[in-house]
Amino acid sequence: IFLTCFMTCLAYSIILGDTFSSLAETAGLTGLMSSRRTSILMITLTAVYPLSCLKSLAALAPVSLMGNIGILMTCIVMTIRALPGGAYSPTAAIGATNFLRSLPAELQPSFGVTGFRSPRSLLILSSMTACAYLVHMVGPEFYQTMKDPSVVRFGILSAVGFGGTALISAFMMCVGFLTFGGACKGMILNNYSTLDKGATLCRLLMGISLLGSYAFLSKGMRSAFYEIFYKGKEITDKIHYRTMQILIGILTTLALFLGDAGFVVSVTGAVLGSSLIYIIPPYLFLKSTKRRTTDGSLTTTSTLKFERLWNKFLICLGVFFAVAGAGMSVANTFFPHLL
């Protein structure tokens, strides 16, 4: 859990750097003041670290609301930009607003060029989706901070949250691809021009949303860290702030030198996501059932044998996804000439 939260926070730091450096360019800043490294340092000092030090997540309610508004606005803007003859279409009418000329070559829409020639893209995508819903580490905090908490209400909250997230994510993938095709970046808003006012507003709102999400993940990361190194000990303010200074410092340093959030997400999903989804739960089931059948508290039946066989298969599947996904992500990022 600690490593999952840590790696996801790292991806968020990279995305925040890209987002706010684009906003700086839109504001007219140039050179060092608009670089992603400067943006990472500034946003870490002014927002990421203070929010990560919060002991209660209740104060983040306004940030969560702003994030929901940002997601809705992003869906609307991306849909408008994806329409035929839109601002990023080569077939836009003469005199119409068109941002293609302001985009570098690698961000220009690309269709019918690459295609599906190997399973590498599918492996990388599956690695990314493996960590799409890894938020169980903050589940207890959500439950405890609910108004009139109950299992039924928490179940409804989870179903609406996960279901809505899945639909919105699929929709954004579709309209993003319809606009830019094979040129889509891991952070799709990076594809849009810094001159695009609609995209600029979306970057600002999504940046605020990411800051709130960062605080939730840092809460899970901090709790897991305490369980590892301070289990059974009192967590004083000194330990609390020193821990966050060290963790945020390491995350920020890594974010300054890693520029591809997609790579971080895919490796995290491949290794940690696959472990938490496919490997660890079946392993615990196998150990538990073996212990109980040995002491006589559980009877060996044909159903149990099938369940144990199925869990062994899941472990093998998880190992395959972890090795293949991580290997493909590393090769695609650092050794593309080998693929």
Image (cartoon, helix red, strand yellow):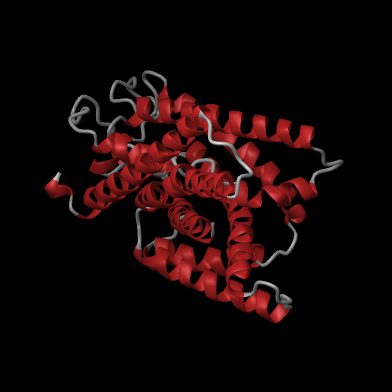
Residue 50 in percent (x, y) is at 65, 67
Q: How many marks?
A: 0
| Image quadrant in which you'd find residue 112 | top left
Residue name at image x 50 percent, y 40 percent: 197
Q: Is the residue 261 above or below the residue 43 in the image?
A: above
Residue name at image x 36 percent, y 39 percent: 317
Residue name at image x 40 percent, y 29 percent: 97
| Image quadrant in which you'd find residue 201 | top right
Quadrant in which the N terminus appears: bottom right
Of all residues shown, which one is farthest toward the right?
148
Q: Is residue 237 left or right of residue 26?
A: right
Camera-side residue of 10 and 101 = 10
Is residue 185 visible to us here?
Answer: no
Of all residues shown, which one is farthest toward the left?
338
Quadrant in which the C terminus appears: top left
Residue 20 in percent (x, y) is at 49, 55
Camera-side residue of 32 and 305 = 305
Residue 300 in percent (x, y) is at 53, 36
Q: Is residue 257 left or right of residue 294?
A: left
Residue 44 in percent (x, y) is at 54, 66
